[in-house]
């Protein structure tokens, strides 16, 4: 494994480090616009534990390529992140192969604290057919970052998936490999009276199955939990969303958590 930091205009590493087992790169210096974190010399189709910044929680991710490129976000592109992320003149990046006992357990299969549109080959990955005004604070990735703060909307910690008032909005979650699902938790944003809420939605799975969800208004932003038994699922969508009869046009998704296990063919 190798971690390097360079700028996109010259690709000359400011610093780099390598290791076969567990790798930590410590960087003394400020990130500049155009800087990229490159994690390379990976084994494709493997699980890794990655912490891209000291204030962002580590995630167990499935990587299907030998190199991951993570552009450092600036300005409006980082308004959905902790304001301390990527700031200052000391930074730490960690990566290690995930252990069997971390992978082969019942766990949240959907969380990825550093998911982005432009990071290829990294799962779980969220996307959608609409994101309000293309703003980072309403990007689909916010719904799988583990943050369930719900008392407002907009900048961190109140980022969410915003649908720009679209009735045909659909959220997609890619796992990158087959998984077995047993529970889905939906956290609707609850910034009332600004927000609306959904009363119904449909989960569609890559295996062809569908599940209809009956949803409700929850003032405290607590999760709505659904027992779902679907095996060998490589992706799923949340769509056919019906909002409540309320003056507000703004329902939104704070978080979705999908619990289950790896499919047996991928057990290590």
Image (cartoon, grey):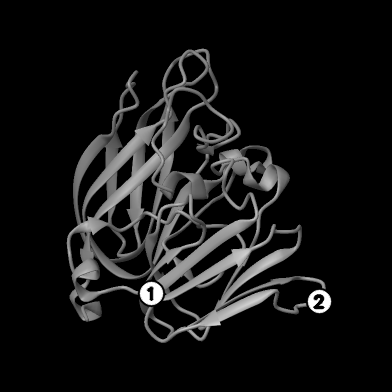
> In front here: 180 or 57?
57
Tags 1 and 2 in contact by the CB under 8 Å rule?
Answer: no
In the image, is residue 63 above or below residue 72? Answer: below
Q: CA distance from mark 1 to mark 2?
A: 28 Å
Asked whether, in this view, residue 119 is left or right of residue 238, the answer is right
Q: Evaluate whether residue 167 shows in this view.
A: yes
> In front here: 255 or 252?
255
Mark toward the start of the polypeptide (1 vs 2): 2
| Helix, strand or loop at mark 1 | strand
**Which residue carries the number 2 mark?**
10
**Which residue carries the number 1 mark?**
96
| Helix, strand or loop at mark 2 | loop
At 71% from the left and 64% from the top, the residue drawn is 35
In the image, is residue 218 above or below residue 137? Answer: above
Asked whether, in this view, residue 47 is left or right of residue 131, the answer is left
At 45% from the left and 84% from the top, the residue drawn is 19
């Amino acid at each position: 494994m190798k971690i390097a930091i360079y700028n996109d205009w010259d690709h000359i590493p400011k610093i780099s480090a390598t290791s076969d087992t567990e790798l930590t790169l410590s960087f003394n210096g400020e990130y500049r616009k155009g800087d990229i974190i490159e994690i390379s010399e990976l084994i494709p189709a493997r699980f890794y534990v990655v912490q891209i910044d000291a204030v962002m929680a580590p995630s167990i991710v499935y990587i299907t390529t030998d190199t991951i490129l993570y552009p450092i976000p600036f300005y409006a592109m980082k308004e959905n992140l902790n304001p301390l992320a990527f700031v200052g003149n000391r930074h730490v990046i960690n990566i290690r192969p995930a252990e069997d006992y971390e992978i082969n357990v019942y766990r949240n299969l959907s969380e990825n604290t550093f998911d982005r549109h432009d990071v290829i080959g990294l799962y779980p990955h969220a996307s959608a057919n609409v994101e309000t005004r293309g703003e980072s604070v309403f990007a689909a990735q916010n719904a799988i970052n583990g943050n369930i703060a719900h008392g407002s909307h907009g900048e961190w910690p109140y980022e969410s998936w915003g649908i720009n008032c679209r009735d045909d909005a659909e959220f997609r979650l890619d796992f990158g490999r087959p998984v077995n699902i047993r529970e889905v938790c939906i956290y609707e944003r609850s910034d009332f009276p600004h927000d609306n809420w959904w009363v119904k939605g449909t989960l569609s799975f890559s295996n062809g199955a569908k599940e209809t969800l009956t949803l409700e208004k929850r003032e405290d932003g607590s999760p709505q939990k659904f027992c779902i038994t679907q095996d060998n699922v490589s992706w799923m969508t949340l769509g056919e969303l019906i909002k409540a009869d309320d003056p507000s046009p703004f329902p939104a998704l704070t978080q979705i958590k999908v619990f289950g296990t790896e499919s047996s063919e991928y057990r290590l």
